[in-house]
Structure formats: structure tokens, C-alpha cells
Amino acid sequence: MRKLRALVLILFLLGCENPFATRSAEPPSIRRGTWEDPSFYDAVLRNLQNSYNEQIIDNFTDSISEDFLFAPDPADDVEYPGIFEDWGFEEERDVTRSIFSSGTGAFIQLALLDTTMEVSFYASGDTVRAEVIYDLSVDQDKVAAPKHLAGRVVFYISEKSGGIWEIYRWEDSKADFPDSSSWGKLKAVFASG
Amino acid sequence: MFKALTLILSLLFLMGAAIPSRSSEYGLTFNRDNRTYRWNNFIRYSSPEARRIHVRASGDLAKTLIKRASGSSGSDRWRDNYSLSSGFDYRLNAWSAIGMDLSGEQNEVNKGEIITRMGHITSFLTLDPRPGVHLEGTVGGKIDQKEQSNLDSKEEGLTYGFSGSWRSSLPKTQTTLKASLSGDKLSAGHSSVQQLMASVKRRLFGGSQITLSFDDQEQGRTNLFGPAEAAVLKRQDRINRSLTFKVELPLPRDHTFNLSLSSTDRRIEYSLPEGPDRQVAQQNSRKNVHRLSAQVVGRPAKRLTFSSDFALEEGKNDFGRDINDEDLDEISLSASVDAALSSRDSLVFSGHVARTSYDVPHPDNYNDRDSFRSALKIGYHHTFSAALQLIAEGTVNLTHLVYLRSQRSANNNWVRLYALYPTLHIRPWENLLIQQRFSISANYTEYDFEDLFTDIKSNIFRQAKTTTDLSYHLGEEINLNFSYTYRTEDFGRLVREGGWVEILSWDKSLQNIEFSVTYPLISRVIITPSLSYGHRREYQHSRGERNFKSRLISKRVGLTGRYKLPPNNDMIFSISRSRENVSGLPDRTFDRLQLSFQHAF
């Protein structure tokens, strides 16, 4: 009787669809974008730049870590109260996806210039503090959003398991010339509509 | 008005702080990290809680300076924050108290570029009319000022608050109810925070029990968003809501069955105060997430603990913009077994498998995708003797990301991670601990449609690492610490030629030594000098040849000191200099400094 029950159970399970199976994918019709394996920290910044210029969200999210934090320029924090509270991975992914999908054929040109890197050794994995001057042009359909941004960013990049480097902290500062706009302002406008 | 409030606060603060008390303290810290300087000062006073009248006061001053880089055309960036607060509460009788709080705050960006000021006065009444019941009401006034590029704004208005809680404990039923509402009504708009929490727990037959709980938090505020000359009035609403039903049912042979059904709703919404299209954006929103979870925990045998968990979840990621909205459903199953094989051996086995599917309704969004994750872990712990223990762990993690549409499927991939971590704990003497850790891991990333592209993205990363930590405790305040790490890793492309073949791209090795000793220099002064040395070499591989790429040497010397003057003073300083040398580049030096002083009155 026990054997019969076991046989019935096995037959029942074999007849069921595997609930953990993934669905089939269509073969790719477009290229996958410019991507370097982020097995060196400097590749992370090149991937971030290329993800913006080619507007490929996966290549952007693969450059930031799950414990990511964004720290805006103090002036942006005052001008956009409450928006940057608890700004982590999900907020960064969602707002960048919105920037990339804004308008039809939105043009984005990002240049990361003058990079200064400081490496810190840790037994668990190294971390890098990268200070970068940026220049970003975004042609999108939001009236309130800046079209040209410039400033200074400090990226903190760490080595994760699997030898992959990812950005875990992004400190934003706007440029010092009058009427300049920062990356934080672009994020704030897209986040708040 | 703001100046008057600051003056009143300062006087109250000085009156409070001038009274010596065990719960009053002053502290200051300074730290410098490369070009960022931070100063913090605080002073706090609090009278003993046991008295009928309780007085408190505090003041904070914080400054941050980010100095411009040498050669940069920019200027230094400043942020200054000042705050003062003072207040008291007076216990009228055993069940009621009254009180008042005054606070003022000023935030300044770049020495006057933007200045915000806030002043707040509030009075309150608390009532505890019967056991398990607490009521509190507040009323007050508030001023908000903002100065920016000669475009000043000022708001004044009322603040209010009410909260109540009730707890009842009947023989078989526990009920908790909490409700609160607070906010302000200023000339430009208002903000509010409301919370409602209710929970009922009922014990049933044979040790079983059911719990029903509801939690709702809603936070809304109307603010001017954007620079002063083009600011737009918008409302931000943060909503977190959940309803949970739980059943705990004891089963035969020391087993328990737990069932949980929950529904959650989390969203941040932005809207215009009026107009036909009021809602303008949503952020980080997961709406109508329903979750069913069933768990069995038990001890099927004397030395065996077992638990399993099955969960189903469905919901919606709603961004308020049709194109990015997505529906999700998830199924997950996990189990773990913990076996005490003998008094010296134990074995842990755990496994987890999950699949999440995202479906995107908008035809121009190609992010329909599935994600499969599985994790297997085996751990073994053996005690040879009190002086020697072995902990060995092995893990296998698999993930498969599948984008369904042709526009996104180029990056579909499997990631397979295999790792083994044995650790030895050696304690030859009571005051010496040596921890020897080893780890080896291999990470394979294989792209599903690799054959369709000319550039190879599939890769393998391998790492071997050993760490020796030694800690020697010589006396009451004398410690010696030593750590050595050796790590070697390589990375290569995976080419499908029948099976997978690796073409090595690079390899690197790293050694790092750290040493520190803590000892009392003179009476009450403890210092910790530390040294570290790191060395890394990287090689590139091309057509089977291994070529030197770069070498990095990092040296760091640091000194931390602590001066404790009983009973009330504590001073800590920490200074370090690190020098980094990369082959072919000039040396670079980085300095860090931290000072902290605390005095209790």
C-alpha cells in the first residue's frame, strides 16, 4: 500500500508543471551594449558612462550594488525636501529607467573626466574612492529637468563576491559656476514628476 | 520673531546646562578625510527622571567643509547646521502631566547661498487614566524661513498632535490599539503623519493561536520643490499599509505549523495641489502585494531540527507612469536541517529555490522577465578539543535571468557560484586566539545567446584566499593583533567549444599584513600604534603569454590614543597616513585625522 501511494505521488509530481521553471526567451534582435567585465574598478566607471550613453538600464544597474546609497549636493537636498530620504538601489534604478525612457529617442551624452582614485586594502575586498568631474547632456521631454549638468561626484566602489566591482555610494556636488545643475537635480525632477 | 525665539531658547538652554547633573554632557569631534572636514559639537542636559519636574536642553553645531581640489577652478563647499532645543514636563498627579518644548534650527549651504530656519514651540498634555490606556495631545506654533538668491520665503502656522494607545490582556486574548495624528498647517500648505496599528492575538485549543494585525502609516507634506525662482508647490505622500493574519498550530512530535497571509501596499506619490492631472509621479511603489507563507518547524528526532518554508507572492510595481509599471509573482521554497551528530560534531544543511516573474503591460516596455535563484549550503562543525575547532562550509548558488523579449534577451545569463570555506579556531592558551580561514570559490557567468555574438561575454572568476588572525591578550589593557591575508585570483573568457573552455584574461595576487598593539602609555592614556602593508601584482594574459600589468604597494601608519580622566572626561584621537605607489606613477599620500572629546558634568 505504501509503495502504491509513493508511486501515485511520483506520477502526480511528474505530471505537474515545474513551478520554478523560467519561461522561454526570444532570440536577441539587438546588441547588448558596450560592456567591460567590472573585474577592475576603473571598468565600473566606463560601464556607467556607456550605460548612460547607450541607455541600457541593465548595464547601469549591474554597476551599482544592492546596498547602494545616493548623497545629494546639500543645495539639492534643501531644494527638493524629502525626495532623497532613503535613496537606495530601487530609487536609483527606477529614476534612471525613467530618464532613459523619457521622450522618443532621447539623446544622452555623459563624459566622466579627471578621475582621481584612492585604493584601500581590506582583507575582505578592496574599496576605491573615485573622485570624478562629469559633464552630462540630456535631451528629454521634461520641462523642469535640466538639459545640461556638470559637477563633481565621489563614487565609492567595492569588490563584491565573484570579483565584481560595484558602486555602493554616490556623493554628488554641483559645479561652482552660476546656474549650473547637478545630477541630483535631474534625479529629483524625474522622481517627483 | 526667529531671533526672539533663538534668544529665549539660548537663555533656557544656559539655565538648564548650568545646573550640574550626572545626565549632562558636552562633546566635540573633528575629523578630516582627505579633503572633507567635519566638526561636531553638542551639549545636553537632562534632570533626573524621578523628579516631579523634568527639564531637558540640548544644542548641536555641525559644520562640513569639502575643500576644492588643487588645480580645480571650483570653490570650497560648506554646510552648517545649528540647533537648540529646550523643554520641560511637569507631573500633575499619578495619571497626568503637562509640558512644553521649544526648538530652533538653522541650516546654511555655502555660507549664505541657501539658508533655512525653523522655529517650533509646542505644549503637551499626557493622560494615563487607567492601566493600559495612554493619551497625549499637543498644540503649538511653527515658523519656516528660506533665503535663497534674494528670493526669501516665510511660512508660519499651527502644529497639532494626538495619540492614544490601549492594551487589553484578557485570559486568552491580547488586544493592542494605537492611533496617532500629527502635523502642521502653515501658510503655504500643510504636512501630516498618521498611524493606525491594531493587533488581536487569541489563544485557541491545544496551544494553537491566531493573530490578526493591521498597520497603516501615512505621511504627507506640501512643499515648494525646486530652486526658489522656479519652485513648484507639490505634495509628497508616503504610504505603508499592511494586513496580516497568522495561525500557529502545534503538531504531533514537537512540530509547529505556521501559516501567514498578508497584504501590503507601499508607495511614494507626488501630486499637484489642484488641477485635473494632479498625480504626477510615483516612486518605489509596490502596490497590492499579497503573500501566503506556510512554515513547518520541528524536531523529528532527538538530535535533529527541521524547518521548511513555502511562499507565494503577487503584486504590482507601480511608478505612476504606464510604461514602467510591472506585475510580479514569486514562488519560493526553502528547507533546513540541523543535526547534532555527536557531542563534538554537528551538520547543517539548507536549501532555497525561488522564481520571480515580471510582466509588463505596456507594449513599448521590453522588460518582461523571469529570475530563478537557488542556494544550497552545507556546514560541518567539529570540536577536536577546547583548543581546536573546525568549521567547514560549502555553498552552491545558481541564478538565471531571462528577459523574454528579443530587444532585451541578449544579456540573459546563468551565474553559478561554488565556494568552500574551512576555518580553524585555535586557542593554545587562554589569552591567545588564532583564526585560520581558507576559502576557494569559482564564479561562472554563461550567456544564453553567446553563439549569436562575436564578442564573448561568458566568463569565469576563481579565487583562493587564506587569512590568519592572531589576537594576544597580555594584560588588562594590553592587546596585540596581527593579521595576514594572501589572495590570488584569475579571470577568463568562457568559450563554448563542445564544452566550456577557459581563455585566461588576467590574474592577480595580493598580500596584506596588519599589526597593532594596544597598551597604556602613561596613567589613563592608552595608545594603539598600527602598521599595515599591502602589495598587489596584476598580470595580463594574451595568446597564452603572461605579461606584467601593474604593481601596487600601499603602506599605512596610524596612531589611536584614548585619554580617560575619571570620572567624566573621555578624549580619543586617531591619525593615519597612507602612501600608495602604483608602478609607473608618482607616489600619493592620504591623511586622515579624527579628534573627539566628551565631558559629563
Image (spheres, coloured by chain):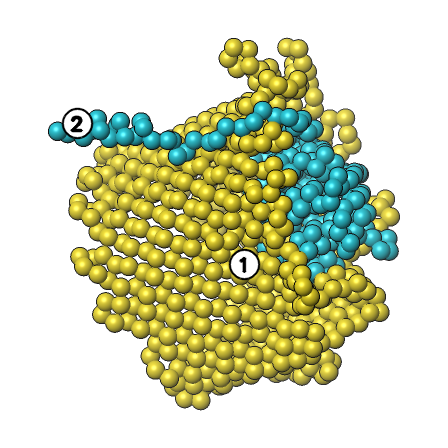
* Label 2: chain letter: A
Residue at image point 32% right, 35% down: B348
Local crowd at mark 1 within 10 Å, few (<14), some, or many (≥20)?
few
Q: Chain of mark 1?
A: B
Residue at numbered disc 2? A4
Residue B304 appears anywhere in the view: yes
Residue B112 shows up from this direction? no
**What residue is drawn where x is 79% and y is 44%?**
A139
Side (left or right) of B400 relative to B171:
right
Where in the figure is residue B438, as x and y percent of width and height?
Answer: 45, 28
Q: Residue furthest left?
A: A1
The cyan-coloured chain is labelled: A
Q: Amino acid at mark 1?
A: Arg
On-image quarter of the C terminus of chain A: bottom right
- Which residue is denoted by mark 1 in the rendering? B524
Q: Is residue B395 left or right of residue A132?
A: left
> In the image, what residue type sits under mark 2?
Leu
Residue at position x 34%, y 82% from top? Answer: B130
Q: Nearer the viewer, residue B86 or A174?
A: A174
Residues B214 and B491: in front is: B214
**Chain assigned yellow:** B
Q: Give the answer, above or below, for where B163 lies relative to B320.
A: below
